[in-house]
Amino acid sequence: VSSPSSILTTVSPDASSSSSSSSSSSSAASYQTVDSSELDMYNNDWMNKYHGKSQLVLKPKTTDEVSRIMKHCYERNLAVVPQGGNTGLVGGGVPVFDEVVVNLGGLNRIRSFDEISGTLVCDAGCILEALDNHIAEKGYMMPLDLGAKGSCHIGGNVATNAGGLRFLRYGSLHGNVLGLEVVLPDGTVLEGLSTLRKDNTGFDLKQLFIGSEGTIGLITGVSIVTPRRPSAMNVAVFALDSYEDVQKTFSQVKKHCGEILSAFEFFDQQSFEVVQGHATAGVRDPFEARHPFYVLIETSGSNKDHDDEKLQVLLEDLLESGLISDGVLAQDETQLQSLWALRESIPEAAGKMGKVFKYDLSMPVDKMYDLVLDMRKRIDEQGALGADKAVEAVCGYGHIGDGNLHINIVAKDYDAATEAIIEPYIYEWTSKVKGSISAEHGLGLMKAQKIGYSKDATSIEYMKRIKDLFDPKKILNPYKYIQV
Ligand code: FAD
Ligand code: 2HG
Ligand code: ZN
Protein backbone atom coordinates (compact mmCIF):
# COMPACT_ATOMS: atom_id res chain seq x y z
CA VAL A 1 0.00 0.00 0.00
CA SER A 2 1.53 3.31 -0.99
CA SER A 3 1.74 6.25 1.38
CA PRO A 4 -1.10 8.64 0.67
CA SER A 5 0.25 12.01 1.60
CA SER A 6 3.18 13.86 3.01
CA ILE A 7 1.73 15.18 6.23
CA LEU A 8 0.48 12.04 7.89
CA THR A 9 1.71 10.19 10.87
CA THR A 10 1.95 6.56 9.93
CA VAL A 11 2.62 3.47 11.92
CA SER A 12 4.29 0.98 9.66
CA PRO A 13 6.79 -1.81 10.06
CA ASP A 14 8.44 -0.78 6.84
CA ALA A 15 10.69 1.98 8.10
CA SER A 16 12.55 2.38 4.81
CA SER A 17 9.53 3.14 2.64
CA SER A 18 7.88 5.48 5.13
CA SER A 19 10.98 7.43 6.05
CA SER A 20 12.06 7.74 2.44
CA SER A 21 8.69 9.29 1.54
CA SER A 22 9.18 11.58 4.48
CA SER A 23 12.58 12.82 3.44
CA SER A 24 11.53 13.35 -0.15
CA SER A 25 8.38 15.27 0.75
CA SER A 26 7.62 18.79 1.94
CA SER A 27 8.75 20.29 5.23
CA ALA A 28 5.31 19.54 6.71
CA ALA A 29 6.18 15.85 6.69
CA SER A 30 5.82 14.10 10.03
CA TYR A 31 6.14 10.42 9.28
CA GLN A 32 6.60 8.22 12.27
CA THR A 33 7.68 4.63 11.94
CA VAL A 34 7.56 2.05 14.69
CA ASP A 35 8.30 -1.62 14.89
CA SER A 36 5.72 -4.24 14.02
CA SER A 37 4.86 -4.97 17.65
CA GLU A 38 3.11 -1.61 17.74
CA LEU A 39 1.12 -2.50 14.64
CA ASP A 40 -0.38 -5.37 16.62
CA MET A 41 -2.45 -3.09 18.80
CA TYR A 42 -4.21 -1.71 15.71
CA ASN A 43 -4.63 -5.14 14.09
CA ASN A 44 -6.07 -6.97 17.10
CA ASP A 45 -9.17 -6.19 19.08
CA TRP A 46 -9.72 -5.77 22.84
CA MET A 47 -10.76 -9.43 23.26
CA ASN A 48 -7.91 -10.70 21.07
CA LYS A 49 -10.55 -12.48 19.02
CA TYR A 50 -10.23 -10.68 15.69
CA HIS A 51 -6.87 -10.38 13.95
CA GLY A 52 -6.04 -8.25 10.91
CA LYS A 53 -2.82 -8.05 8.96
CA SER A 54 -2.64 -4.41 8.02
CA GLN A 55 0.79 -3.09 7.23
CA LEU A 56 -0.25 0.55 7.33
CA VAL A 57 -1.88 2.52 10.11
CA LEU A 58 -2.48 6.21 9.46
CA LYS A 59 -2.97 8.66 12.30
CA PRO A 60 -4.22 11.95 10.85
CA LYS A 61 -4.55 15.01 13.06
CA THR A 62 -7.08 17.08 11.12
CA THR A 63 -10.25 16.66 9.09
CA ASP A 64 -8.38 17.88 6.05
CA GLU A 65 -5.82 15.09 6.45
CA VAL A 66 -8.61 12.52 6.76
CA SER A 67 -10.18 13.94 3.61
CA ARG A 68 -6.90 13.69 1.69
CA ILE A 69 -6.35 10.11 2.84
CA MET A 70 -9.81 9.14 1.65
CA LYS A 71 -9.41 10.90 -1.68
CA HIS A 72 -6.18 9.01 -2.23
CA CYS A 73 -7.66 5.65 -1.20
CA TYR A 74 -10.83 6.21 -3.22
CA GLU A 75 -8.92 6.93 -6.40
CA ARG A 76 -6.82 3.79 -5.94
CA ASN A 77 -9.56 1.49 -4.59
CA LEU A 78 -7.78 0.98 -1.30
CA ALA A 79 -9.88 -0.48 1.49
CA VAL A 80 -9.96 1.50 4.74
CA VAL A 81 -10.94 0.62 8.30
CA PRO A 82 -11.86 3.62 10.48
CA GLN A 83 -10.66 3.03 14.01
CA GLY A 84 -11.35 4.84 17.28
CA GLY A 85 -10.20 3.56 20.67
CA ASN A 86 -10.42 -0.06 19.45
CA THR A 87 -12.65 -1.13 22.34
CA GLY A 88 -15.43 -2.48 20.10
CA LEU A 89 -16.70 -5.96 20.91
CA VAL A 90 -17.78 -7.22 17.47
CA GLY A 91 -14.59 -6.98 15.43
CA GLY A 92 -15.67 -3.85 13.51
CA GLY A 93 -12.64 -1.68 14.24
CA VAL A 94 -9.82 -3.95 13.10
CA PRO A 95 -8.97 -5.02 9.55
CA VAL A 96 -9.95 -8.42 8.23
CA PHE A 97 -6.99 -8.63 5.84
CA ASP A 98 -4.55 -5.82 5.03
CA GLU A 99 -6.93 -2.86 4.81
CA VAL A 100 -5.43 0.54 5.66
CA VAL A 101 -6.29 1.47 9.23
CA VAL A 102 -7.19 5.12 9.76
CA ASN A 103 -6.99 5.67 13.50
CA LEU A 104 -8.74 8.87 14.58
CA GLY A 105 -6.88 9.26 17.89
CA GLY A 106 -4.91 12.26 16.61
CA LEU A 107 -8.11 14.28 16.21
CA ASN A 108 -8.46 15.12 19.88
CA ARG A 109 -9.29 18.82 20.23
CA ILE A 110 -12.26 20.20 22.07
CA ARG A 111 -13.62 22.78 19.67
CA SER A 112 -16.13 24.59 21.89
CA PHE A 113 -18.36 24.26 24.93
CA ASP A 114 -21.40 26.44 25.56
CA GLU A 115 -21.95 26.71 29.30
CA ILE A 116 -25.54 27.88 28.94
CA SER A 117 -26.88 25.18 26.61
CA GLY A 118 -24.36 22.46 27.55
CA THR A 119 -23.49 21.91 23.89
CA LEU A 120 -20.07 20.39 23.32
CA VAL A 121 -18.36 20.40 19.94
CA CYS A 122 -15.22 18.30 19.66
CA ASP A 123 -13.02 16.20 17.43
CA ALA A 124 -14.12 12.58 17.01
CA GLY A 125 -10.92 11.18 18.53
CA CYS A 126 -11.48 12.70 21.98
CA ILE A 127 -11.60 10.04 24.68
CA LEU A 128 -14.99 9.81 26.37
CA GLU A 129 -13.60 10.07 29.91
CA ALA A 130 -11.44 13.07 29.00
CA LEU A 131 -14.53 14.84 27.68
CA ASP A 132 -16.48 13.97 30.81
CA ASN A 133 -13.66 15.33 33.02
CA HIS A 134 -13.39 18.48 30.93
CA ILE A 135 -17.05 19.40 31.19
CA ALA A 136 -17.28 18.26 34.85
CA GLU A 137 -15.33 21.41 35.72
CA LYS A 138 -18.19 23.39 34.23
CA GLY A 139 -20.92 21.40 36.02
CA TYR A 140 -21.91 19.14 33.11
CA MET A 141 -21.45 15.49 32.18
CA MET A 142 -21.48 13.33 29.08
CA PRO A 143 -24.89 11.73 28.44
CA LEU A 144 -23.23 8.33 28.09
CA ASP A 145 -20.89 6.26 30.21
CA LEU A 146 -19.36 2.84 29.61
CA GLY A 147 -16.74 0.56 31.12
CA ALA A 148 -14.42 1.41 28.21
CA LYS A 149 -14.66 5.18 28.86
CA GLY A 150 -10.90 5.51 29.49
CA SER A 151 -10.08 4.34 25.92
CA CYS A 152 -13.10 4.67 23.63
CA HIS A 153 -13.53 7.77 21.47
CA ILE A 154 -16.65 9.86 21.15
CA GLY A 155 -16.43 9.20 17.38
CA GLY A 156 -16.39 5.45 18.07
CA ASN A 157 -19.31 5.86 20.44
CA VAL A 158 -21.31 7.65 17.75
CA ALA A 159 -20.24 5.18 15.05
CA THR A 160 -21.49 2.27 17.20
CA ASN A 161 -24.43 4.20 18.72
CA ALA A 162 -23.10 3.01 22.08
CA GLY A 163 -25.67 2.62 24.85
CA GLY A 164 -24.03 2.03 28.21
CA LEU A 165 -24.82 2.85 31.78
CA ARG A 166 -26.63 6.20 31.48
CA PHE A 167 -28.96 5.22 28.64
CA LEU A 168 -31.90 4.68 30.99
CA ARG A 169 -31.81 8.34 32.02
CA TYR A 170 -30.39 10.24 29.04
CA GLY A 171 -31.44 8.05 26.13
CA SER A 172 -29.79 7.23 22.83
CA LEU A 173 -27.11 9.14 20.94
CA HIS A 174 -29.74 9.47 18.20
CA GLY A 175 -31.31 12.04 20.52
CA ASN A 176 -28.21 13.62 22.06
CA VAL A 177 -26.03 14.13 19.00
CA LEU A 178 -26.86 17.50 17.41
CA GLY A 179 -24.48 17.40 14.49
CA LEU A 180 -21.63 15.55 12.84
CA GLU A 181 -18.73 16.36 10.56
CA VAL A 182 -18.07 13.37 8.34
CA VAL A 183 -15.50 12.56 5.66
CA LEU A 184 -17.16 10.49 2.95
CA PRO A 185 -15.39 7.64 1.15
CA ASP A 186 -14.32 9.87 -1.77
CA GLY A 187 -12.87 12.50 0.57
CA THR A 188 -15.81 14.93 0.48
CA VAL A 189 -16.41 16.59 3.83
CA LEU A 190 -20.03 16.62 4.97
CA GLU A 191 -20.19 19.73 7.17
CA GLY A 192 -22.97 18.99 9.62
CA LEU A 193 -21.69 20.26 12.95
CA SER A 194 -24.93 21.98 13.86
CA THR A 195 -25.61 22.96 17.46
CA LEU A 196 -29.34 23.41 16.93
CA ARG A 197 -31.74 21.37 19.06
CA LYS A 198 -34.49 21.66 16.48
CA ASP A 199 -34.06 21.56 12.73
CA ASN A 200 -36.68 20.12 10.40
CA THR A 201 -35.10 21.05 7.09
CA GLY A 202 -35.03 17.87 5.07
CA PHE A 203 -33.69 14.41 5.86
CA ASP A 204 -31.67 14.27 9.09
CA LEU A 205 -28.54 12.84 7.46
CA LYS A 206 -26.49 12.64 10.66
CA GLN A 207 -28.79 9.88 11.91
CA LEU A 208 -27.49 7.60 9.15
CA PHE A 209 -23.95 7.85 10.52
CA ILE A 210 -24.97 7.19 14.12
CA GLY A 211 -24.56 3.42 14.40
CA SER A 212 -23.14 3.02 10.86
CA GLU A 213 -19.94 1.44 12.27
CA GLY A 214 -17.56 3.14 9.85
CA THR A 215 -19.20 1.76 6.72
CA ILE A 216 -20.37 4.99 5.03
CA GLY A 217 -18.07 7.71 6.35
CA LEU A 218 -15.42 8.69 8.88
CA ILE A 219 -16.78 10.84 11.66
CA THR A 220 -14.28 13.62 12.38
CA GLY A 221 -16.32 16.02 14.53
CA VAL A 222 -19.21 15.65 16.97
CA SER A 223 -21.66 18.18 18.39
CA ILE A 224 -23.50 16.78 21.38
CA VAL A 225 -25.82 18.12 24.04
CA THR A 226 -24.75 17.33 27.61
CA PRO A 227 -26.87 17.35 30.77
CA ARG A 228 -26.05 19.15 34.06
CA ARG A 229 -23.96 17.02 36.37
CA PRO A 230 -26.19 15.90 39.23
CA SER A 231 -25.06 17.20 42.62
CA ALA A 232 -26.50 14.23 44.50
CA MET A 233 -25.74 10.66 43.50
CA ASN A 234 -26.62 7.44 45.25
CA VAL A 235 -25.81 3.86 44.45
CA ALA A 236 -27.27 0.73 46.04
CA VAL A 237 -26.84 -2.95 45.32
CA PHE A 238 -29.55 -5.42 46.26
CA ALA A 239 -29.35 -9.20 46.54
CA LEU A 240 -32.33 -11.22 45.31
CA ASP A 241 -33.47 -14.81 45.20
CA SER A 242 -35.16 -15.01 41.82
CA TYR A 243 -35.38 -13.33 38.42
CA GLU A 244 -39.08 -12.80 39.10
CA ASP A 245 -38.04 -10.67 42.08
CA VAL A 246 -35.60 -8.71 39.88
CA GLN A 247 -38.49 -7.69 37.65
CA LYS A 248 -40.79 -6.82 40.55
CA THR A 249 -37.99 -4.81 42.13
CA PHE A 250 -37.59 -2.82 38.90
CA SER A 251 -41.24 -1.95 39.07
CA GLN A 252 -40.99 -0.88 42.73
CA VAL A 253 -37.85 1.16 42.10
CA LYS A 254 -39.59 3.05 39.30
CA LYS A 255 -42.59 3.64 41.56
CA HIS A 256 -40.51 5.05 44.43
CA CYS A 257 -37.63 6.73 42.62
CA GLY A 258 -38.66 7.01 38.96
CA GLU A 259 -37.80 10.70 38.55
CA ILE A 260 -34.28 10.35 40.01
CA LEU A 261 -33.43 6.89 38.70
CA SER A 262 -30.34 6.95 36.45
CA ALA A 263 -29.37 3.27 36.21
CA PHE A 264 -30.93 -0.11 36.85
CA GLU A 265 -28.46 -2.92 36.14
CA PHE A 266 -28.58 -6.61 36.99
CA PHE A 267 -26.06 -9.44 37.23
CA ASP A 268 -26.41 -13.06 38.19
CA GLN A 269 -24.42 -15.09 40.71
CA GLN A 270 -22.17 -16.53 38.01
CA SER A 271 -21.19 -13.01 36.89
CA PHE A 272 -20.62 -12.01 40.50
CA GLU A 273 -18.37 -14.99 41.09
CA VAL A 274 -16.34 -14.31 37.95
CA VAL A 275 -15.72 -10.79 39.25
CA GLN A 276 -14.79 -12.02 42.72
CA GLY A 277 -12.35 -14.49 41.23
CA HIS A 278 -10.77 -12.47 38.44
CA ALA A 279 -11.30 -8.71 38.62
CA THR A 280 -8.39 -6.45 39.45
CA ALA A 281 -9.26 -4.20 42.35
CA GLY A 282 -11.98 -2.74 44.53
CA VAL A 283 -14.46 -5.56 44.16
CA ARG A 284 -14.85 -7.17 47.54
CA ASP A 285 -18.13 -8.93 48.29
CA PRO A 286 -20.26 -6.54 50.41
CA PHE A 287 -22.68 -9.32 51.41
CA GLU A 288 -22.39 -12.10 53.95
CA ALA A 289 -23.65 -14.79 51.60
CA ARG A 290 -23.87 -15.39 47.87
CA HIS A 291 -27.21 -14.76 46.13
CA PRO A 292 -28.70 -15.88 42.79
CA PHE A 293 -29.22 -12.30 41.53
CA TYR A 294 -28.03 -8.78 42.18
CA VAL A 295 -29.30 -5.41 40.99
CA LEU A 296 -27.50 -2.10 41.06
CA ILE A 297 -29.51 1.08 41.13
CA GLU A 298 -28.19 4.60 40.79
CA THR A 299 -30.10 7.79 41.47
CA SER A 300 -29.06 11.24 40.31
CA GLY A 301 -30.66 14.40 41.58
CA SER A 302 -30.07 17.84 43.01
CA ASN A 303 -31.08 17.38 46.66
CA LYS A 304 -29.06 14.80 48.58
CA ASP A 305 -31.32 14.69 51.67
CA HIS A 306 -34.40 14.21 49.53
CA ASP A 307 -32.80 11.40 47.48
CA ASP A 308 -31.30 9.68 50.57
CA GLU A 309 -34.70 9.64 52.21
CA LYS A 310 -36.35 8.19 49.11
CA LEU A 311 -33.77 5.44 48.86
CA GLN A 312 -34.08 4.61 52.53
CA VAL A 313 -37.85 4.23 52.18
CA LEU A 314 -37.36 2.09 49.07
CA LEU A 315 -34.83 -0.14 50.82
CA GLU A 316 -37.12 -0.69 53.81
CA ASP A 317 -40.07 -1.38 51.53
CA LEU A 318 -38.13 -3.92 49.47
CA LEU A 319 -36.81 -5.70 52.56
CA GLU A 320 -40.22 -5.77 54.24
CA SER A 321 -41.98 -7.10 51.15
CA GLY A 322 -39.34 -9.81 50.91
CA LEU A 323 -38.43 -8.83 47.35
CA ILE A 324 -34.78 -8.45 48.27
CA SER A 325 -32.84 -10.53 50.75
CA ASP A 326 -30.08 -8.01 51.42
CA GLY A 327 -28.99 -4.56 50.31
CA VAL A 328 -26.11 -2.10 50.63
CA LEU A 329 -26.21 1.63 50.14
CA ALA A 330 -22.99 3.51 49.34
CA GLN A 331 -22.14 5.99 52.09
CA ASP A 332 -19.43 7.90 50.27
CA GLU A 333 -17.79 8.28 46.87
CA THR A 334 -15.35 5.39 47.47
CA GLN A 335 -18.16 3.00 48.31
CA LEU A 336 -20.13 4.28 45.36
CA GLN A 337 -17.23 3.45 43.05
CA SER A 338 -16.72 0.01 44.57
CA LEU A 339 -20.38 -0.89 44.18
CA TRP A 340 -20.25 0.19 40.53
CA ALA A 341 -17.09 -1.92 40.14
CA LEU A 342 -19.11 -5.04 40.96
CA ARG A 343 -21.06 -4.47 37.76
CA GLU A 344 -18.56 -2.66 35.53
CA SER A 345 -15.77 -5.21 36.06
CA ILE A 346 -17.70 -8.14 34.62
CA PRO A 347 -16.36 -7.86 31.01
CA GLU A 348 -12.78 -7.35 32.19
CA ALA A 349 -12.95 -10.20 34.75
CA ALA A 350 -14.53 -12.60 32.23
CA GLY A 351 -11.77 -11.70 29.77
CA LYS A 352 -9.12 -12.56 32.34
CA MET A 353 -10.78 -15.89 33.07
CA GLY A 354 -10.92 -17.11 29.46
CA LYS A 355 -11.99 -16.45 25.90
CA VAL A 356 -15.40 -14.84 25.96
CA PHE A 357 -18.17 -15.43 23.44
CA LYS A 358 -20.21 -12.27 23.90
CA TYR A 359 -23.88 -11.78 23.06
CA ASP A 360 -25.65 -8.45 23.33
CA LEU A 361 -29.39 -8.85 22.98
CA SER A 362 -32.56 -6.92 23.55
CA MET A 363 -35.88 -8.59 24.17
CA PRO A 364 -38.90 -8.38 26.45
CA VAL A 365 -37.56 -8.31 30.02
CA ASP A 366 -39.74 -11.21 31.20
CA LYS A 367 -38.12 -13.53 28.63
CA MET A 368 -34.52 -12.51 29.20
CA TYR A 369 -33.31 -14.85 31.84
CA ASP A 370 -34.94 -17.91 30.26
CA LEU A 371 -32.33 -17.58 27.54
CA VAL A 372 -29.45 -17.64 30.02
CA LEU A 373 -30.92 -20.78 31.63
CA ASP A 374 -31.53 -22.43 28.24
CA MET A 375 -27.99 -21.63 27.15
CA ARG A 376 -26.49 -23.19 30.27
CA LYS A 377 -28.68 -26.27 29.88
CA ARG A 378 -27.78 -26.66 26.22
CA ILE A 379 -24.03 -26.36 26.81
CA ASP A 380 -24.26 -28.75 29.75
CA GLU A 381 -26.25 -31.31 27.73
CA GLN A 382 -23.44 -31.30 25.17
CA GLY A 383 -21.04 -32.16 27.99
CA ALA A 384 -19.21 -28.87 27.51
CA LEU A 385 -19.93 -27.00 30.77
CA GLY A 386 -17.62 -27.23 33.77
CA ALA A 387 -14.28 -26.26 35.27
CA ASP A 388 -12.24 -28.53 33.02
CA LYS A 389 -14.59 -28.40 30.02
CA ALA A 390 -14.77 -26.19 26.91
CA VAL A 391 -17.05 -23.69 28.66
CA GLU A 392 -16.31 -22.61 32.21
CA ALA A 393 -19.07 -20.10 32.87
CA VAL A 394 -22.25 -18.65 31.39
CA CYS A 395 -22.82 -15.17 32.80
CA GLY A 396 -26.07 -13.22 32.44
CA TYR A 397 -26.08 -9.50 33.19
CA GLY A 398 -26.85 -6.17 31.65
CA HIS A 399 -28.89 -3.04 31.37
CA ILE A 400 -32.16 -4.60 32.41
CA GLY A 401 -33.75 -1.17 32.72
CA ASP A 402 -33.27 -0.84 28.94
CA GLY A 403 -34.30 -4.43 28.13
CA ASN A 404 -30.69 -5.23 27.21
CA LEU A 405 -29.14 -8.57 28.20
CA HIS A 406 -25.45 -9.46 27.96
CA ILE A 407 -24.53 -13.12 27.91
CA ASN A 408 -20.81 -13.82 28.36
CA ILE A 409 -19.86 -17.42 27.70
CA VAL A 410 -16.39 -17.92 29.09
CA ALA A 411 -14.61 -20.65 27.14
CA LYS A 412 -11.15 -22.15 26.95
CA ASP A 413 -10.75 -21.15 23.29
CA TYR A 414 -12.49 -19.34 20.48
CA ASP A 415 -13.02 -22.67 18.74
CA ALA A 416 -15.60 -23.58 16.11
CA ALA A 417 -17.00 -26.51 18.12
CA THR A 418 -17.92 -24.30 21.06
CA GLU A 419 -19.35 -21.63 18.77
CA ALA A 420 -21.50 -24.26 17.05
CA ILE A 421 -23.14 -25.14 20.37
CA ILE A 422 -24.10 -21.50 20.89
CA GLU A 423 -24.89 -20.29 17.36
CA PRO A 424 -27.26 -20.12 15.58
CA TYR A 425 -29.34 -21.31 18.55
CA ILE A 426 -28.93 -18.04 20.45
CA TYR A 427 -29.90 -15.92 17.42
CA GLU A 428 -32.89 -18.13 16.58
CA TRP A 429 -34.08 -17.92 20.18
CA THR A 430 -33.79 -14.13 20.14
CA SER A 431 -35.54 -13.86 16.79
CA LYS A 432 -38.44 -16.00 18.02
CA VAL A 433 -39.19 -13.52 20.81
CA LYS A 434 -38.82 -10.62 18.33
CA GLY A 435 -35.67 -9.40 20.01
CA SER A 436 -32.58 -7.77 18.55
CA ILE A 437 -29.32 -9.66 18.08
CA SER A 438 -27.44 -6.41 18.67
CA ALA A 439 -28.83 -4.10 21.32
CA GLU A 440 -25.82 -1.76 21.58
CA HIS A 441 -22.49 -3.26 20.43
CA GLY A 442 -23.29 -3.33 16.72
CA LEU A 443 -22.86 -5.90 13.97
CA GLY A 444 -19.18 -5.52 13.05
CA LEU A 445 -17.59 -8.63 11.60
CA MET A 446 -19.16 -10.95 14.15
CA LYS A 447 -22.75 -10.39 13.02
CA ALA A 448 -22.28 -9.14 9.45
CA GLN A 449 -24.27 -12.12 8.20
CA LYS A 450 -26.78 -12.24 11.00
CA ILE A 451 -28.84 -9.09 10.51
CA GLY A 452 -31.64 -11.18 8.98
CA TYR A 453 -32.50 -12.48 12.46
CA SER A 454 -33.65 -8.99 13.42
CA LYS A 455 -34.53 -7.15 10.21
CA ASP A 456 -36.83 -7.97 7.30
CA ALA A 457 -35.66 -8.32 3.68
CA THR A 458 -37.01 -4.93 2.58
CA SER A 459 -35.19 -3.09 5.37
CA ILE A 460 -31.95 -4.90 4.52
CA GLU A 461 -32.36 -4.06 0.84
CA TYR A 462 -32.74 -0.34 1.62
CA MET A 463 -29.75 -0.45 3.96
CA LYS A 464 -27.68 -1.92 1.14
CA ARG A 465 -28.82 0.88 -1.16
CA ILE A 466 -27.74 3.46 1.41
CA LYS A 467 -24.32 1.80 1.60
CA ASP A 468 -24.06 1.88 -2.23
CA LEU A 469 -25.06 5.52 -2.34
CA PHE A 470 -22.30 6.67 0.02
CA ASP A 471 -19.67 4.07 -0.80
CA PRO A 472 -20.17 2.81 -4.37
CA LYS A 473 -16.65 1.35 -4.47
CA LYS A 474 -17.20 -0.46 -1.15
CA ILE A 475 -13.84 0.64 0.25
CA LEU A 476 -15.02 1.54 3.75
CA ASN A 477 -14.88 -1.19 6.38
CA PRO A 478 -15.42 -4.10 3.97
CA TYR A 479 -16.75 -7.51 5.14
CA LYS A 480 -18.52 -5.83 8.09
CA TYR A 481 -22.05 -4.78 9.08
CA ILE A 482 -24.40 -6.10 6.35
CA GLN A 483 -23.09 -8.99 4.29
CA VAL A 484 -26.17 -11.07 3.70
P1 FAD B 1 -13.66 1.22 17.86
O1 FAD B 1 -13.70 -0.04 18.63
O2 FAD B 1 -12.34 1.71 17.44
O3 FAD B 1 -14.59 1.07 16.57
C1 FAD B 1 -15.89 0.56 16.68
C2 FAD B 1 -16.59 0.71 15.31
O4 FAD B 1 -16.78 2.08 15.00
C3 FAD B 1 -15.80 0.13 14.16
O5 FAD B 1 -16.69 -0.40 13.22
C4 FAD B 1 -15.07 1.33 13.58
O6 FAD B 1 -14.80 1.16 12.21
C5 FAD B 1 -16.06 2.44 13.82
N1 FAD B 1 -15.46 3.75 14.12
C6 FAD B 1 -14.70 4.09 15.18
N2 FAD B 1 -14.42 5.40 15.14
C7 FAD B 1 -15.01 5.90 14.02
C8 FAD B 1 -15.09 7.18 13.45
N3 FAD B 1 -14.52 8.24 13.99
N4 FAD B 1 -15.79 7.31 12.29
C9 FAD B 1 -16.41 6.26 11.72
N5 FAD B 1 -16.36 5.02 12.23
C10 FAD B 1 -15.68 4.84 13.37
N6 FAD B 1 -20.64 -0.58 24.29
C11 FAD B 1 -21.87 -0.15 24.64
O7 FAD B 1 -22.67 0.18 23.78
N7 FAD B 1 -22.26 -0.10 25.95
C12 FAD B 1 -21.43 -0.46 26.97
O8 FAD B 1 -21.82 -0.43 28.13
C13 FAD B 1 -20.12 -0.89 26.62
N8 FAD B 1 -19.25 -1.24 27.58
C14 FAD B 1 -18.01 -1.69 27.23
C15 FAD B 1 -17.14 -2.07 28.25
C16 FAD B 1 -15.87 -2.56 27.93
C17 FAD B 1 -14.94 -2.96 29.03
C18 FAD B 1 -15.48 -2.64 26.56
C19 FAD B 1 -14.11 -3.13 26.19
C20 FAD B 1 -16.35 -2.27 25.57
C21 FAD B 1 -17.61 -1.79 25.88
N9 FAD B 1 -18.52 -1.40 24.89
C22 FAD B 1 -19.76 -0.96 25.25
C23 FAD B 1 -18.17 -1.52 23.47
C24 FAD B 1 -17.34 -0.32 22.93
O9 FAD B 1 -16.62 0.28 23.93
C25 FAD B 1 -18.20 0.69 22.29
O10 FAD B 1 -18.79 0.12 21.16
C26 FAD B 1 -17.49 1.99 21.88
O11 FAD B 1 -18.47 2.91 21.49
C27 FAD B 1 -16.47 1.82 20.76
O12 FAD B 1 -15.71 3.00 20.64
P2 FAD B 1 -14.21 2.97 20.09
O13 FAD B 1 -13.74 4.37 19.98
O14 FAD B 1 -13.37 2.07 20.89
O15 FAD B 1 -14.44 2.38 18.64
C1 2HG C 1 -21.36 -3.74 29.50
O1 2HG C 1 -22.55 -3.43 29.62
C2 2HG C 1 -20.78 -3.72 28.12
O2 2HG C 1 -20.64 -3.99 30.46
C3 2HG C 1 -19.92 -4.93 27.79
O3 2HG C 1 -21.73 -3.50 27.16
C4 2HG C 1 -20.71 -6.21 27.74
O4 2HG C 1 -18.68 -7.41 27.55
C5 2HG C 1 -19.88 -7.43 27.35
O5 2HG C 1 -20.47 -8.39 26.87
ZN1 ZN D 1 -23.63 -3.04 27.89
Image (cartoon, grey):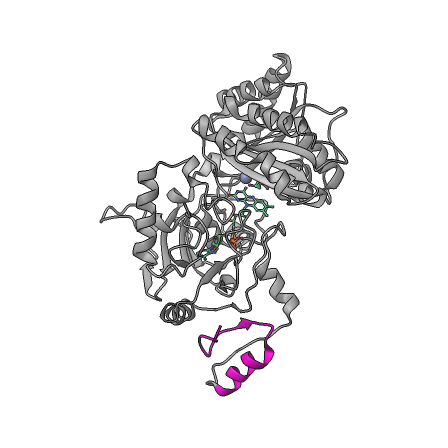
Q: Position of residue 70 (x, y in %)?
A: 40, 67
Question: Which quadrant holds the C terminus?
Answer: top left
Q: Is residue 61 magenta?
A: no
Q: Nearer the viewer, residue 145 or 83?
A: 83
Q: Position of residue 236 (x, y in %)?
A: 62, 29
Q: Is residue 7 magenta?
A: yes
Horizontal arrangement in the rendering, residue 16 relative to residue 3 (left or right): right
Q: Position of residue 285 (x, y in %)?
A: 74, 32
Query: In the rendered view, would you say 9 is above or below 406?
Result: below
Horizontal arrangement in the rendering, residue 376 relative to residue 209 (left or right): right
Which residue appears at 70% of the width and 30% of the height?
383
The span picked out in magenta is: 1-24
Task: For residue 302, say whether it is visible.
Answer: no
Q: Position of residue 189 (x, y in %)?
A: 33, 64
Query: In the rendered view, would you say 369 is above or below 230?
Result: above
Task: For residue 26, say whether it is visible.
Answer: yes
Which residue appears at 39% of the width and 67% of the height?
77
Which residue appears at 76% of the width and 34% of the height?
387
Which residue appears at 62% of the width and 73% of the height?
34
Q: Residue furthest bottom?
A: 24
Q: Nearer the viewer, residue 329 or 25?
A: 25
Horizontal arrangement in the rendering, residue 352 relative to residue 479 (left or right): right
- How many numbered marks appear? 0
Query: In the rendered view, would you say 22 is above or below 382?
Result: below
Quarter of the view holding residue 407: top right
